[in-house]
Image: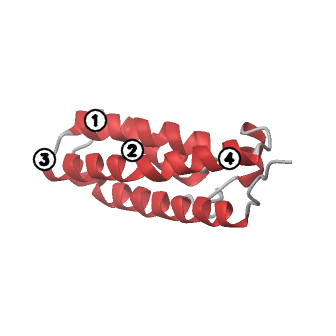
Amino acid sequence: MKTEEKCPVLDEAGLRDRTSDDEELLREVIDLFVQETPTHEQEVRSALQTGDMDLLGRAMHAIKGTAGNMGGARVLDLSGKIEESTKHAPVTALSDDVEECLRQLHLLKQALVALVRRTPVATAA
């Protein structure tokens, strides 16, 4: 599944819109995403190792939701396709796509961390 040509890693404008351009809220949701990402990655890896398609489907659903909220179009696209595929394809057929999704998730996390570093910290007046 090649999504790089048609989807950005991060839709920063969309994310800023969803957080009403509130810098503090932006930092909070990014921090929460960064904290939750390892849990989702661990669930995916566990599902791959055990062949648990239900767990893989649930993990991809969770990743899809968080990526969509964060403006991660590539991850949203890949995780949605993988989630749907868990209903009819064996885990071995999905492993390359899952690895690509995890790679894109890592790129999204890096882009979000970079965004936080560029975002001014609000100060009390």
| Residue furthest out toward the front | 125
Q: What SS does tag 1 mark?
A: loop
Instruction: Verify CB contact (< 8 Å) between mark 2 and mark 4.
Output: no
Q: Residue at x 46, y 62 (%)?
A: 106
Q: Residues within 10 Å of mark 1 (few under 14, many from 20)?
A: few
Image coordinates of residue 43 in percent, x first then y, are: 27, 46
The disc at residue 50 is: 3
The alpha-carbon separation of the residues under discs 2 and 1 comes to 10 Å
Precedes in sequence: disc 2 or disc 3: 3
C-alpha separation, residue under disc 2 versus residue under disc 3: 17 Å
Which label belongs to residue 69?
A: none
The residue carrying mark 1 is: 88
Residue at 52% across / 64% down in the picture?
A: 107
Which callout, 2 or 3, points to the residue nearer the camera? 3
Residues marked 3 and 1 touching at CB (< 8 Å): no
Q: Mark 4 = which residue?
A: 26
The residue where tag 2 is placed is 82
Where is residue 54 shown, x and y percent of the image? 24, 33
